[in-house]
Amino acid sequence: MPVRSVAIPAEHGGWSLTLEPILLGLIVAPGIAGLAIGGAALLLFLARTPVRIALVDRRRQRRLPRTAVAERVATAELTAMAALGAVAVSTAAAPFWWPLAAATPLIATELAYDVRSRSRRLIPELAGSASMAAVAAMIALAGGTDHAVAAGLWCVAAARAVAAIGFVRTQLRRGKHQPSRQATSDGLQLGALGMVAGGWMLGWVSTAGLIAIAVVALVHALLVRRPVPDVPVIGAQQVVLGLAVVVAAGLGALAP
């Protein structure tokens, strides 16, 4: 049983939605603690695959060759994640745990779907990406950033994930000639915009972050009405949009 088959996530878009909050947090509050938190978040993303495999096999009361491999890989990754967490705690300028506590119900929701082999549905994808977005807030807090600014970073990162998931799911279904609804993508674009608008009115989200998400929502609304490009093109579009949001929101949070 090749380790790669149980250790590498199949969700290609998950890499971007994991790295974007890490980069956003590090732009605002670079430091050892932030790097440790970011590394732990990346390991958590990687560990999700073997953990899911092990839990699904246990739930179905079966023991396959992949099960033992998945358990060993998950144990190694979770151990390394705990070590990085200890580094983060020892080097952080301030406590950074409240975003993790707030994201726990989202993590539990994703895990509940994973155990039942339903991780590709909309709800677990939204819950998982929104919980990973909390990493931006954790990194910011660990660097001594204000709580309101940290909440704003989480808001922007979560909104970016919601907009991306709605758009990409619709485009992939269109590309496969499966039933799809533009209203689903449009509704999630509006939801993402509403999230950052609320954060902006509360003084958490910078104007640059609000504009960045508004541009992303508009681009998605236009592209979803055009012919569907190849999957690599869709992926490249999301990488560019994600980096643009990260840079704009990060610099906006740093602006006086």
Image (tube, rainbow, N blue to C red):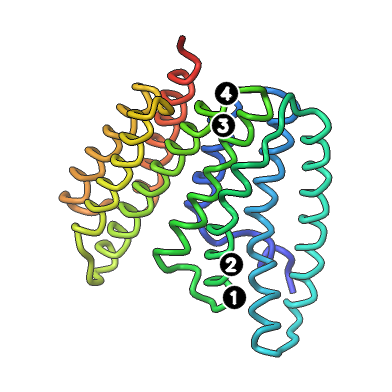
Residue contact between numbered discs 4 and 3, judged by CB atoms under 8 Å: no
Amino acid at dot 2: Leu
Q: Name which residue lies at 69% across and 66% down.
A: 50
Point out the frontmost of discs 1 and 3.
1
Residue contact between numbered discs 4 and 1, judged by CB atoms under 8 Å: no
Point out the frontmost of discs 2 and 4.
4
Q: CA distance from mark 4 to mark 3?
A: 18 Å
State left or right for residue 46 relative to residue 205.
right
What is the crowding at mark 4: few (fewer than 14 residues within 10 Å), some, or many (at least 20)?
few
**Disc 2 target residue:** 111
Q: Secondary structure at mark 2?
A: helix
Q: In the image, is residue 49 above or below residue 12?
A: below
**Disc 4 target residue:** 146
Q: Name which residue lies at 20% across and 63% down.
A: 181
Residue contact between numbered discs 2 and 1, judged by CB atoms under 8 Å: yes
Q: Quadrant of residue 39?
A: top right
Q: CA distance from mark 1 to mark 3?
A: 30 Å
Tell which circle, 3 or 2, labels the residue nearer the N-terminal end: 3
Tell which circle, 2 or 4, labels the residue nearer the N-terminal end: 2
Q: Quadrant of residue 46?
A: bottom right
Viewer-side residue, 149 vs 251: 149
